Every structure is written in structure tokens, then in C-alpha cells.
Image: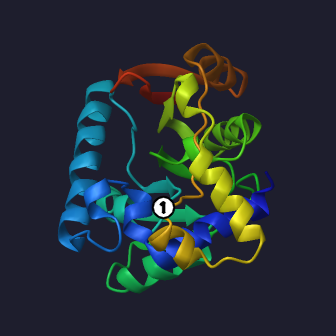
Amino acid sequence: MSLSKHKRDWDDLGRVDPLWAILTSPEHRYDKWNIQEFFARGAAEIAHVMQHAGQLGLPRQRRAALDFGCGVGRLTRALAKHFDRCVGVDISDAMISKACEWHRDWPTCHFVLNTTGDLRVFKEDSFDLVYSNIVLQHLPSVGLIESYIKEFIRILTADGLLVFQLPRHIPWKNRVQPRRRVYRFLRALGVSEDYLLKSLKLTPMRMNFVPEARVKRIVQAAGGVVVSVERGNDIDQVYYVTRR
């Protein structure tokens, strides 16, 4: 699957049901998220991350943070309470447009559209914290996941902290993803995203995973070191990484 098709999928989601696309609770589908609750969950998530980061003594400084796969800015806004400047980056024009609209009164939050398989738009040593949750798993390939992890470490400051979530495996029964395949087929035929998402209840979201051992090899090869791993449910893990 090309990155352009991946972008199209997330533009579809961003236009039709952006909040559910970010937090896919079944009861909140079709514009049923309460916006205050939506952002409050982001604040609680980042509060937990920063508490654990404090226990690790990282990052040493809190000048700039990057929210990778920012969507409408749920976590960018939360990070703004802890850092001087926060940048949200996303592949979807629709998501970035909504993030900019909802954060006009947040001068420390900035949003960037990025449609490449790297983060060349940012220089080395740019961010004290790089954060990504429920994003890497949706990328089209493991190779692209690996590329972004390497980029995260490149743009991380010395004594900075990279935090990202990834499933370590997906059960075989969940790997076929028929609703995604039907969505892609019908979308290619010109069926509208609104009809596919709301009437047929399909989704373009794909799920990928990377085993823990491979993640650690990727991090090490890029000059990083895993300092902590949080295990959530049966498949998800959150990696805390710093630069060597």
C-alpha cells in the first residue's frame, strides 16, 4: 500500500469522523464524542506519561515536544501544559485543518502536515520529547514503522525522551481485516467515504505490529536505548527510549 493511499484513508476519516478515528470507542462513532471528554482523556494520558518520565529522570529539559500522528491535536494540547513549545505532525490535511481551527488560542501549539516517509522537515536534536500513541500500528508497512522510529531518535535531543506505542503481535484471526479490504476496493471504484464509513460501517484502518525484540534492535541500530517498557493489554507495549 502506498503512502498516498494511506493519506487518502486518513483524509477520509478526518472529514467524516475525526474524533472516532483517533479514539475508536464503538459508542462514540458517528460524531458521538463529547469534545471536553475527548481532550480530557488526552490530558490524563500525558499526565501518566510525564509521571513515568519523571521517575526515569527524562527528558532533562522541557523546551519542545513533538506529537507524531497528532490528528486534531488531542495530545499536542496536553503536552503544551508540560513544554514551552509543542508541534503536532500528521499526514492528513483534514486532521491538520481541524487541529489548527481548534487551537487558534493555543500559541504554543503548532501543526505541520507531513506526507513523506521521514521527518526531514525537522532538524536533528529538535525535540526534548517525541511522543506517538495509537499511530505507528496503522502505518502501511513494518518498514515504514522502522523508518519513523529511526527518525524519532534522529530528531531527539541528547537526554531527551522518545515514547511510542506498538503492538508486539496481532492474533491471526485479526490479521485478515476484511472490512478494510472491502473499504479499499469500493473506494477505488468511487464509492464515497461518507457512505462507506457511516452506512456500511467499514473502515480503512489497518493494523500492524512489531515484535519487541525487533523494536529493540531498531532502536539500538539508530543510536537509542530502551530504558523502560510498559505493557498494557495482551498485545500493546509502550517503549521509553533515550539517545546513547
SS assignment at label 1: loop
The residue lying at 59 percent from left, 75 percent from top is 193
Residue type, label 1: Cys
Determine which residue is flagged by label 1.
70
**Res 57 visible:** yes
Indicate whether 10 appears above or below 148: below
- Residue at left offset 30%, top offset 59%: 78
Q: Position of residue 178 (x, y in %)?
A: 61, 46
Give the residue furthest to the front: 200
Residue at image point 69% right, 36% down: 150
Instruction: Determine if residue 121 is in view.
Output: no
Q: In front here: 63 or 112?
A: 112
Q: Residues within 10 Å of mark 1 (few under 14, many from 20)?
A: many
Q: Residue 239: x and y, percent?
A: 46, 28
Residue that appears at 26% across and 64% down: 39
Looking at the picture, does residue 216 appear above or below residue 67? above
In this view, 178 is above or below 212? below
Quadrant of the drawing holding the C terminus: top right
Residue 237 lies, with reference to residue 4, above or below; the image says above
In this rendering, the count of numbered labels is 1
Whether residue 28 sits left or right of residue 244 in the image: it is left
Q: Position of residue 49 (x, y in %)?
A: 30, 39
What is the residue that sits farthest to the right in this orientation?
A: 2
